[in-house]
Amino acid sequence: MKNKITFGRFEATCITITLLSTQLFLNLPRIMMEAAWTAAWILTVYISLLALVLFTIIFKLYKRFEGKDLLDLGEHIGGSIGRIIVGVIVLFFLLYIAPVILREFSENIKIIALPQSPLSFVMIFFVAGMIAASYLGIEAIVRFSAIIVPIIIAGYLLIIAGSIQYTDISRITPWLGSGPYEIFVKGIPRISVFAGIILIYLLFPFIRTYRNFKTVGYASIGLSGFFLIIGVLVFSLVYQYPTGTESFLPVYQLARLIDYGRFFQRVESIFVIVWVASALLHLTTLLFLIVYVFKKTFKLEFYKPLIIPFSIVVYTLSFFPHNLISAIELEKSFRNLAWIISFLLPIVLLVIARFIKKNPKKEAGNA
Amino acid sequence: MADADYIKLIKELLLFKEPQKVEKFILKENKRDKEPGEQENSDAINVDAKRKKSKGMHLNKNSESKQDEKQKQESNEHGKKEQKSEISEKLSVNLEYMKRIYSIPQNGDIILREFDIVVKDKVIPAFMLFYDGMVDRKVINDDILQPLMLLSNLDIKGDEKCIAEFVRNHLLPHNQLNEVKDYRKVIDEINFGGCGIFLEGMDSAFAADVKGWEHRGVERPNTEQVIRGPQEGFTEILRVNTALVRKILKDEDLIVENITIGRRSKTPCSMLYIKDITNDSLVNEMRRRLENIKLDYIIDSGELEQLLEESGFSPAPQVIATERPDRVASLLSEGKVAVILNGSPFALVAPATLAGLVHSPEDSYVRYPYANLLRLVRIIGILFSLLLPGVYIAITTFHQEMIPTDLLFAIEASREKVPFPSLVELLIMEIMFELIREAGIRIPGPIGPTLGIIGALILGQAAVSANIVSPILIIVVAVTGIGSFAVPNFSLGLTFRILRFAYIFLGAMSGFLGITVGLFIQGIFFTSSKSFGVPITVPFGPKTTRVWGGNELIRSPIWKQERRSDYLNTKDEAKQPNISRKWAEQDEGSGNNEE
């Protein structure tokens, strides 16, 4: 398994942050508020810490399997069948979330900026970006993310900074919101917010070393956790609990408040650029992962011929929900279950793989 | 038949073909054992680099040997056509042969001069050949013909028996004289402004370098003008150009390698690099590319650039073309490779990065705050030239809420009488502007000012009075134009000029969404393209060390630029010691002592 393409820690962290934090621009603050009421930010802190703990467990278990992704682990356990089973599970996961995200972003952009354009037309732009980027490969995507993610983060922090003047500390009282049981026990499945971390288990061969894997994992979970926490916190400080749950696109709602003097009052359109860029990066990464995992699962030689078919599949699947609300419902149910694949699956695979000892020579021959 | 072709074309477009496995060039890292830059270990690094070089050669062995065979075959074919290549002892045979080769007497500018010389009381017939206009007549008359015809009558002490040796030692005082046995070599020399001398009874000929054609002197560079800094530009003469660079660098490690390009034109070309700085694999790659260019004639380095670049489809230029010897010198000192082609006043320097294309030679000559301000202005210019019309269309069509109310009224009032939608209006003006720009270059000098008057009238006054376009749009187009003139690299300017139209259409189709998708695709294209193994978006993607220091996008103070660019993997990383302003340290030291 010689892999010529590799990328550094910074690039890998940037792309993982995109996959973890883009949901901020969708519904995350509202979903958190629905779950924990005024204590949404406590829930976010809690699940961020939980994600860090789980990642620590996973990376400790990963120690012996440097440079192996989830599919390699599957192969290590059960040969080709194991690899195909893991691959199909991951593919199902990716093919579920990609169309939902595509649909939500397109619907939101349609509502924000292009109310008269048909949805399919808006989607075509996203799909075009996804196809072009996937053709140029992961190296280009990752490098571009290293350039664009800092800009997106700067834009996001500007929105947060601009809306700080509207905050009021009393809006996050009562402190424990819906109650400790709701937050700390029922909130555990919310760890699926960090489901995107699956990216680094799949791209481990590109990240190469165990040390890089550790750094990338901690940095991306830590930074994304930070962005999610300040996003949720500022949102709950600006919009009170019942009102907040009714707002669509929470961060956009924040951006609309921004008012820098008399001249710059309606700058949220500029943030459309930030939104679309992060959405494109997110969707592109998902599409690339789909074709990459498909290729690897079935041991195909090339992935490029798969790009157009799979983008058509994603495009078509994204029309399945009747409307935006049902798409959001689909995302919510995903967020309840995704932890099974992104945290439980690697742990289970790694634990089983630890008990299976293979003849190292044979293994080398296979590789 | 034609139908079948179309079907084939469509199939080729739609169906997947297995990509050919090509080993792509990657700029390899030099192994560094100790702290680089120290004198002691530079030898070690050299050895290392040599080892690497031999490795690289080994990799390419197969392909190279194949190429050698091909070349041999080609030269064999060439030989067959001419039937013979060795010079004959009989003058009449040589004369006949040369007459046939140079199509005398149809060919008007070739001069064939027959004469006799006296060698030790023996009269020997001889002839010489050269192109009129390409040689220095004075040199031919004074240093070649006169001594041969007149001096040979003098009584010369010398006991050489061979005529060639005698003539060479006593009768030809010219300084650049070669004795060749091969017709091909004489012919090449004559074709490039030399003169060939044949003597009876001698199975070789003299080829004298007497070049002396008319050429332009060293003048100010036309396209890259600066206020501070040297005011010399390259000319069309290769040796003058290499000398201009050498004059600046004054370093014996500056290597000027000669390579000939063009099967027929045999255009001389020089590859310049600094031996103990530039990465060997980069030099080898440039040499490999230059040596493997097969075409009949090459005229300008603009053609060479297209033959050297990795991807013909990439929107960004992959080579820096510059007219300035000082710029070439400073890029060479960074560890890049330059190529100068005879007949072109533009040198090519590789690898190029996007950040490097925004640089102007002046940046190094002014203090760093000014340089950074100038760079910022250039980047704003690039953004304007690329995005302004597209953003204007996007805002006026889709995002009107962004415009403050008063401005919205102003725009609306000015557009009230215009019958076109803003896209059409914008396209009219952009096309007009491109027309004027193109015509401005092609127009004969004396009627140049007319164009300015017509342009100003059409673009400005008349178009507005006729209600064809709104005044705000004229401002937009004008600012875009000015922005595009601020792009320091001509090729990069053209890139943005073309892409601007794509953004206009994207903005008109779907506002900021379209523009962002366009930027995304363009960005991904940029990050995927490479120049001689270096990604052009370095140091930002992939991120290398020293992103903000040094002299990439932002220029740090000159005493802070201690290291060469990381992505070039140079043999010697340090440009200067950590403290290059020793005096400042001493000042502080003495100050402290006083305290």
Image (tube, coloured by chain):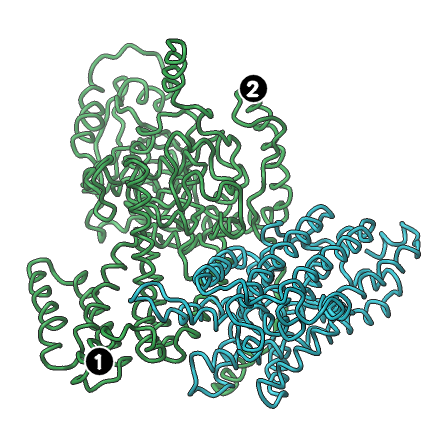
The answer as to whether the residues below labels 2 and 1 share one chain is yes
Crowd band around label 1 with a 10 angstrom C-alpha radius: few (<14), some (14–19), many (20+) = some
Residue depicted at 77% across the width and 56% down the height:
A68
Q: Chain of mark 2?
A: B
Q: Chain of mark 1?
A: B
Chain (green): B
Identity of the amino acid at label 2?
A: Glu
Q: Is residue B283 visible?
A: no
Q: Residue A56: image x %, image y %?
A: 76, 53
Q: Quadrant of residue A288?
A: bottom right
Identity of the amino acid at label 1?
A: Glu
Q: Left or right? Give the position of B456 relative to B104.
A: left
Question: For mark 2, what is the residue?
Answer: B40
Tell me the quarter of the image containing the C terminus of chain A.
Answer: bottom right
State the SS at label 2: loop
Label 2 – label 1 distance at C-alpha = 72 Å
